[in-house]
Image: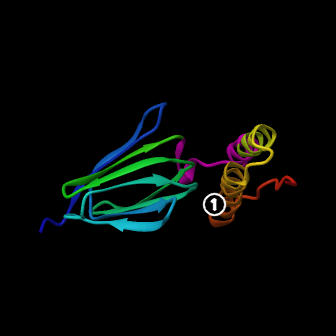
Amino acid sequence: MADTMQFDLVSPERRLASAQVASVQIPGADGDMTAMPDHAPTITTLRPGILKVSGPDGTSEYVVTGGFAEITASGVSVLAERAVAKGDMTQDAMDDMMEEAHGTYKKVKENFQNEPGPVDDAAKLMSDMVAMGDEIGLSTKQPSL
């Protein structure tokens, strides 16, 4: 069993990380998980949260708002809708993310008036954004639903 595995984090704008790491804590849509070397192959969707990476160079944390993680025996590749190093997160960026999530909720609520599934999913997205803001110490403007 190897001590490290390859980790890659990319967003539409750029590659944020590429390194040998010991573990990756992933905020999965169906629950958080930790991937380590020789992990069983898995693909999961991401929910808004903190992606934590531990390796020989220490620990790094990234704010992600969605996307996919592919875990193989040799590594983890994360394709994030939006990703920012936790240290680079600002209140303005958090406000923008919340505004976008609220806009998505309003649009879904208008388009799916009698279908609770998509509306519930959009409301959960906003809830996850609030929880993420609390975790990183940034306040969120909590719009009324």
Determine the residue positioned at 67% across, 56% down: 129
Residue 23: where, in percent of width, then height?
32, 65
Which residue range is magenta in the image?
Answer: 82-100
Horizontally, residue 44 falls left or right of residue 82, namely left
Q: What kind of colouring is applied to the model shown?
A: rainbow
Q: Is residue 69 magenta?
A: no
- Considering depth in this image, is 55 or 43 the residue closer to the camera? 43
Residue 125: where, in percent of width, then height?
66, 53
Determine the residue positioned at 73% across, 47% down: 98
Residue at the far left: name it.
1
Determine the residue positioned at 54% across, 41% down: 82
Residue at the far front: name it.
114
Residue 48: where, in percent of width, then height?
58, 54
Q: Is residue 96 magenta?
A: yes
Residue at mark 1: 132
Report the amino acid beneath label 1.
Met
Using the image, determine if residue 56 lies above or below residue 117.
below
Residue 123: where, in percent of width, then height?
73, 55
**Picture quarter containing residue 56?**
bottom left
Which SS class for mark 1?
helix
Quarter containing the C terminus:
bottom right
Q: How many marks?
A: 1
Horizontally, residue 116 falls left or right of residue 76, namely right
Label 1 neighbour load within 10 Å: few <14, some 14-19, many 20+: many
- Considering depth in this image, is 96 or 117 the residue closer to the camera? 117
